[in-house]
Image (cartoon, coloured by chain):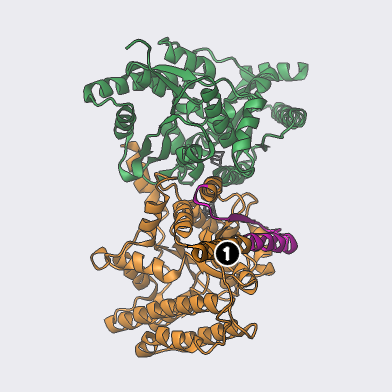
Amino acid sequence: MLEQKKIGIPRAISYYNNYPFYYGFFSELGFEVILSDKTTTGLINNGSECVVSDTCLPIKVYVGHVLNLLDKGCDTIFVPSLQSTAHKINNCSKVRGLPEIIRNVVNRRFNMIEPTLDKTEGIGIKEFCKDIANQLKIYDNDIINLAMKKGWQMYDNFVQMAKSGISHQEAMQNAISGKFSLKNIDVVKPLSVVIMGHGYNLFDERISMNILKKLEKMGVKVYTGLNVSREEAMDAIQDIGEIQYWANELDLTGAAAYYMQKRKVDGIIALSAFGCGPDSLMVDEIQYHAKNKNIPMIVLTIDEHTGEAGFITRLEAFVDMLIRKKRKLIAEKANLKHMPEKINQNKEQVFLTRA
Amino acid sequence: MQAKVSKEIQLNKYSQMDDNIKAKDRIIAWPRMGRIDIPLKALLLTLGAKVVIPPANSKETLELGVKNSIEGICLPYKLNLANYIMALESGANTLMMFQAPGSCRLGNYTKMAQKTLKKMGYEFDMVIFDMYKSKMKQTLQAFWHVTRCINPFKYYKAFSLGFNKFFAIDEAEKQMFYYRPREIRKGEAEKYYNKWLKIIDETNTIMGAKTLVKKIKKDFKNIEIDGKKNVPVVYLLGEFFVLLDPYTNQNVEKVLGEMGIEVQRQIMFSGWLEHVLKPSIFYNKESHRERCVRYAKKYMKRAIGGECIETIGDTVYAAQNGVDGVIHLMPFSCMPEIVSQNILSKVSKEEDIPVITLVLDEQTGKAGYITRIEAFVDLVKRKKYKNQNKNLRERTTV
Ligand code: SF4
Ligand code: SF4
């Protein structure tokens, strides 16, 4: 073998949650992993051209990334169908049908590696990995198991690092290059929010209009689904009396419910794609509880035409409102002379009056 | 492990079979789905239950539904919710929910509808029928739960009435689809259909119900038709609820029939019922779904929820069996059907069959809608006549 075999992975949809696993798995199998470029407007336009206009933005982006890989000369592309991630916990039909969409809308010749994960039908990660390997003509179970182990290891590291507060990008970089570090000191910021949204929306800087960095710049501490463990998220969903229905629910309802219950945050931001079915349900659930608990919430909907200016204006207005609310609260508390967390509050007060 | 435990807790917490309403006080209602009300009513009445049937969907229904649900949710949910509200208003206290073939947002629907209705102050018990996965046993249990009927003969009678009425309605529909484009006196087929619906509804004996299909077939033959008329056949397919609801699809069946098209709808109740309720040992025919999976293979390798694979499979089947065109109906933002829509353009090209997708939402304007159908019908007719002429020429030259 002269050249190392290559596999292309689109930087979209499950990339954002699972890439470390994919990377570990494929590189251990002896493949060079080729990633598509970061999302750009041009890439979105290319993707949009192939699908009907009612398709949601993340899927258009996905198609764009597949085209990008093909343009790079990569002709083996990994397009998984993640049907269900636990018994009867399904993904949205479009995520489930990614290979079906790609097969029919991308009119170019290439080799699509399309494994299925469907725990409802008893097709777990093991079968999923075997499926991938077999499609790549690798049949040795020992090799497959080893690769899987490598995948898990990178994935676990990623999850731990991200949970400790390291940024998504950095945690991913570290994980795939075998580094491990945890963030111990949490910078105290006067305001904090939780963003509920799919990983592929939040961490794609083009789709999310860089909302994370923008908030940090405004002095807001941001929590996402990455900062909550699986168990915590599931418990939180139960705590507020809901049941998990969607595979992505932990990143949305789970994260929001967790921070809502712990009363750690001053506000909730929902970021979702226009026309997204699951999001509309989950956001509605959280809105209901947020209202009951008197936590401000804003819903930001995005599509390929969303203008950045308007988006920022809305975000800033929301943050301003949070600041005003908090100031008032602190003032009231000060008047009541009821200051259990004296030191902390004073600090916040000083900061807020200065800001 | 953790996941498993918590799921069990969840199941208990949301267990649907409340028992706080006595069987004799139960008044049962269910959402509108085609004419399912006729057989279901017969079935439940025979078992000794009381029922309420919400009025057919209309502008009022839709408005009520829209007012009480969130914006992003799909049209079928809004209509179902309104059906429930209307039924509860007229005294229902037990709501039945059917899990239709797809397993898309429906699981969530029920949960949400329940919450919304409770918030609105209604008291009721919700019983869920998973018509897709459950077999005879669960179905019987559910009916036992709402009626507490223990007389086996009554069950026999109830199911026999219900089933035969299902089949009769399907037959009457099929006949109407055939006769409507061919009838000489406009509107006659529909008159026959309505007449038969009434008879089906009023039939009360097992024997009577069993002979319905035969009688319907015979009776429709009395309609005078233009035998020489060239009638193209068009398949109607797509999402279950909009396909079966004449209000949401703006009676597309009738519109097409009057344009001289014979429609065939792929989701018929009896086919579905047969496949669902008959124990698999008695069922050795290929089911509709199995056929769809087989025909869709070139384009789809897996089902992805909803009726997506049916849509694709039926379209391919249509193309390979001389059907002249396909109309694909879907509610706005329907996830599985958006996938279908994306795949269909390729199917249409490769299988050489005209396909049009009609997206239905709350504001579908009638005028634009009809114009699009007209243009499509023109295309279908032109294509059909062209092919026929070509065949004719080939035959004469040989
Ligand atoms: S979950 Fe929402 S955003 Fe994601 S693919 Fe489905 S519809 Fe699109
Ligand atoms: S199949 Fe479509 S209409 Fe039905 S629940 Fe799913 S998204 Fe809604």
Ligand 1, by image quadrant, is top right
Q: Nearer the viewer, residue A207 or B79?
A: A207
* Residue at the disc numbered 1: B389
Disc 1 chain ID: B
Q: Quadrant of the N terminus of chain A?
A: top left
Up-down: is A243 above or below A180?
below
Residue A347: where, in percent of width, then height?
Answer: 67, 16
Q: Nearer the viewer, residue A35 or B7?
A: A35
Residue B350: where, in percent of width, then height?
Answer: 50, 47
User: According to the rendering, which colour does chain B have?
Assistant: orange
User: How dense is the environment of label 1, judged by Cα within 10 Å: few (below 14), some, or many (20 and up)?
Assistant: few
Q: Write the residue at 69% across / 29% down.
A: A333
Up-down: is A339 above or below B166?
above
Q: Secondary structure at mark 1?
A: helix
User: According to the rendering, which colour does chain A have?
Assistant: green
Residue type, mark 1 in image = Asn
Up-down: is B93 above or below B68?
below
**Is residue B25 shown to the viewer in this render?**
no
Residue A214: where, in percent of width, then height?
Answer: 68, 21
**Is B168 left or right of B226, judged from the image as shown?**
left
